[in-house]
Amino acid sequence: MSKKANHDRQPHMVNKNARRNFELMEKFEAGLSLMGSEVKSLREGRVSFKDGYIRFKNGEAYLSGVHIAPYENAGPPGHGGHEPERDRKLLLHGHEIRQLANQVEQKGLTVVPVRIYFTRGKAKLEIAVARGKKLHDHRETLKRKAVQRDMEREMSRV
């Protein structure tokens, strides 16, 4: 079996609420500074994005609000384990951090995690600059999906 086929089977976890609640504008790929038990837990797909967001502090970017479940075979936090809700440093270039921080300062924009995946054994986080959807945007999206579903249903009958 080739190594490339093995990489294709690596799990990737998607933040479904990001596309539902936000209009995604510009995407970036960032590395994650993780502990060993966090990587093992990610490989099992045990992550919850729930209220995840990216915050900026002292010229660095951090992933906050993402829950990575403790790895069962690791010890308690401080002894090989990790805190499930801790802030995790993002590995981005300085100009990318400045660009994202400037965009977040604009009214109505935020940076949200979209998905976590593995590339060449390294955990990567896809983040996006996003604008929150309003109620009428949600309704418009639902209408569009309903129309598309009806069209597909009619096409399958023919």
Image (tube, rainbow, N blue to C red):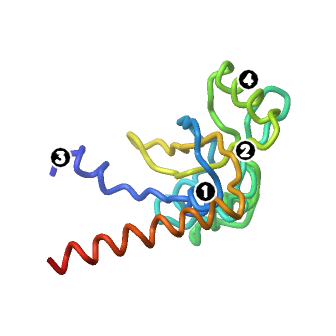
Name the residue beneath numbered marker 2: 54
What label sits on residue 153 in the rendered view? Answer: none
Residue 22 vs 71, above or below: the answer is above
Name the residue beneath numbered marker 4: 98
Depth order, front residue of 107/34: 107
Report helix, strand or loop for mark 2: strand
Q: Looking at the image, is mark 1 or mark 4 earlier in the sequence?
A: 1
Task: Name the residue: 55% across, 44% down.
Answer: 125
Question: Which of pointers 3 and 4 indicates the residue nearer the eye?
Answer: 4
Task: Name the residue: 70% across, 40% down.
Answer: 89
State how far apart marks 2 and 3 are (Cα).
Answer: 36 Å
Report helix, strand or loop for mark 4: helix
Mark 4 near mark 2, Cβ–Cβ under 8 Å?
no
Task: Name the residue: 18% across, 80% down.
Answer: 157
Name the residue beneath numbered marker 3: 2
State how far apart marks 3 and 4 are (Cα).
Answer: 40 Å
Tag 4: amino acid: Arg
Tag 1: amino acid: Ala
Name the residue beneath numbered marker 1: 18
Task: Name the residue: 53% across, 36% down.
Answer: 29
State how far apart marks 2 and 1 are (Cα).
Answer: 13 Å
Going by the image, does 42 lie left or right of 62? left
For the C terminus, the image quarter is bottom left
